[in-house]
Image (cartoon, grey):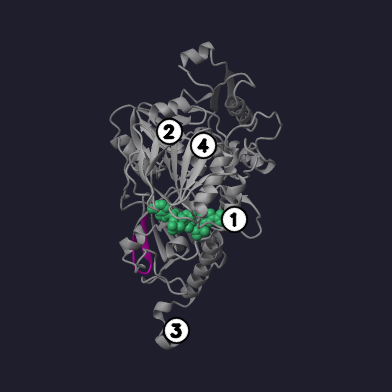
Amino acid sequence: MSLFRKSPPDHGHDHGPDSASTPSDDGAERPVLDPQTKLDLQGLFQHFQQDVEILLFAAADGVDVFSTAARKVLRAMAELSPRIRLSEHAPDSPRARDLSVSATPTIIMSPERCRFRYLGAPVGEEGRTLIEALILLGFGDSSLSPPSRKLLKTLDGPRQVKVFVSLTCPYCPQQAINALKAALERPDLVAVEIVDIQANPDLADQYGAHSTPQAFAGDKLIALGAQAEELFMASLVKLEQQTIFIPDSDAQLIAADLVVVGGGPAGLTAAIYGARSGLKTVVIEKDALGGQVATTPVVENYPGLTSVGGKALVDLMVSHALEYCQIFPGEEVMEITPGQPLALATNRRRFTARAVLLATGARHRQLGAPGEQRLAGRGVSYCATCDGPLFKNRAVLMVGGGDSAVTEALHLANQGASVTLVHRREKLRAQARLVEQLENLKIPVIYNAEVKEIKGQERVEAVVLADTAGGPERELKVDGVFVAVGYDPANALARRLGLALTPEGYIQVDERHHTSQTGVYAAGDVQGGFKQIVTAAGQGAAAAMSIFEDLMNPYWTRTRAEKA
Ligand code: NAP
């Protein structure tokens, strides 16, 4: 949930949640928290078991927007509980020297208990990091899962962790909090700095961190993207990115009627419908809730909402689903064993279910051009919402001709990037309304061109474009390449289960969302179709109703005559 009021965008047109990224110094007095959030937090914070000490090292008001924003948000937090003790210090104070503070703003939290610093202003999406940090410190427990604690016990040397984040990245708080939990659990060995790359561009450049989140231990990159907690701990221990973690067989067991795998529009809608029909329903999501919508700058075709930030729409859906069911974010389903009930194992616990809905969505496609993988996170990005603010006043190329590419090109232009769109054909595939906006903003489009190579040593420096109409190749100097060339179904679990797939890899379903495996259903982008938010939500609702009817009157026990 976005807990903080957003500052106005620094470019006129964009009303999405991303526009909150840069703190405003317009002097307008707006409360940091809305009244309800304030009450909720006060209620929670009054149960704190320990004091939380916050030291803020910031420039005087009006000197830099990040210092001003950090001061404002921390003062608002300190007002919520006498247990939050804020002290403010000048960056050249003796205390700053003692603590080797070298950047403003720097926030140090409870230094007597852990080594945790935040470099920047925790606003926008990073408001979640601040709130969760306060909660963990206030309750005095890392709240790590037993497998994570076990992993950290095996840590054999010091780790200086840096997690690079941006204020518009919905994935970042998960990774920042993973790092804080490690610092709380092993204060003897783990020191953590969360670095906002907009406030600290030089440090980001030094580490070559040009996408978020990225986690380093010392100089070593240990994770690109957000991870489940156990995977982060394993990466920290092994000093390289880990992708698989299987829990012990005695992990916690939760019995549910319906387990929904995937927390995008299809999964969340199915959960609302499933739970409201009386099924004990849970949602498991390994990444950020909302799927692709969470990083869609603006949505203009969801009925009832003329224009809404993708993340704001997700927050509404998540709040709605939480009214009825439990959601397990940051958890990855590793295994599904067919049967009645079905058995599922995540990286943290086990579930049984009478039905499973796969709403795993789709993963962005790669271009496959030389240089793309090597420079991923070093100027090559797949998320304009997360990484766009880093390219203000820089030249970027947006690749693709569909709705995503055009929506994201508009967003990048609104963020102040100098963006050029490149499309492999002579006509864009995107909706006319979006193309019109592109023309209004005078964003140049290069037609009939394909990215042949992405060049650069430490970071993106140029692209080589091949002319699909047979003309000569050309090289274009750019600082970033954003790729939006469509999505492939996220079908890894379906493949492991041996489900029947279409030739394109989508899960084959009948009109009632049944897959080829009894008790397993599919909905949303992983089943293919129109891939709109509203159609995914519709499929989720239909699948949940189908599941409810089947559980009342199982199709797998009905005779052929009854089915007809
Ligand atoms: P898409 O509609 O599949 O478009 C992908 C684009 O990338 C196409 O223009 C395609 O070219 C191009 N492309 C594919 N492979 C390429 C390659 N290797 N090199 C260069 N270009 C390549 O994907 P999308 O834009 O991500 O949209 C996915 C779905 O989400 C769609 O249903 C879309 O309507 C929906 N969506 C909607 C909105 C909105 O309503 N605001 C926003 C985002 C997404 P060709 O045209 O030549 O095939």
Residue 317, given in percent of the width and then of the height, sits at 57, 55
Is residue 476 in sight in this rendering? Answer: yes
Segment colored magenta = 336-345
Q: Is residue 264 above or below residue 178?
A: below
Q: Nearer the viewer, mark 3 or mark 2?
A: 2
Circle 2: residue type: Val
Label count reads 4
State left or right for residue 160 relative to residue 135. left
- The residue identified by callout 4 is 129
Q: Which mark is residue 336?
A: none
- Looking at the image, tell me whether mark 1 or mark 4 is earlier in sequence order: 4
Residue sitting farthest toward the right = 29
Q: Who is closer to the viewer here, 383 or 444?
A: 444
Label 4 – label 3 distance at C-alpha: 51 Å
- Looking at the image, tell me whether mark 2 or mark 1 is earlier in sequence order: 2
Circle 1: residue type: His
Q: Which mark is residue 320?
A: 1
Q: Nearer the viewer, mark 2 or mark 1?
A: 2
341 inside magenta stretch: yes
348 inside magenta stretch: no
- Looking at the image, tell me whether mark 4 or mark 2 is earlier in sequence order: 4
- The residue identified by callout 3 is 563
- Looking at the image, tell me whether mark 4 or mark 3 is earlier in sequence order: 4
Q: Which mark is residue 163?
A: 2
Q: Nearer the viewer, mark 4 or mark 2?
A: 2
Q: Are marks 1 and 3 in contact (CB under 8 Å)?
A: no
Is residue 149 in sight in this rendering? Answer: no
Q: Residues within 10 Å of mark 3 (few under 14, many from 20)?
A: few
- Looking at the image, tell me whether mark 3 or mark 2 is earlier in sequence order: 2
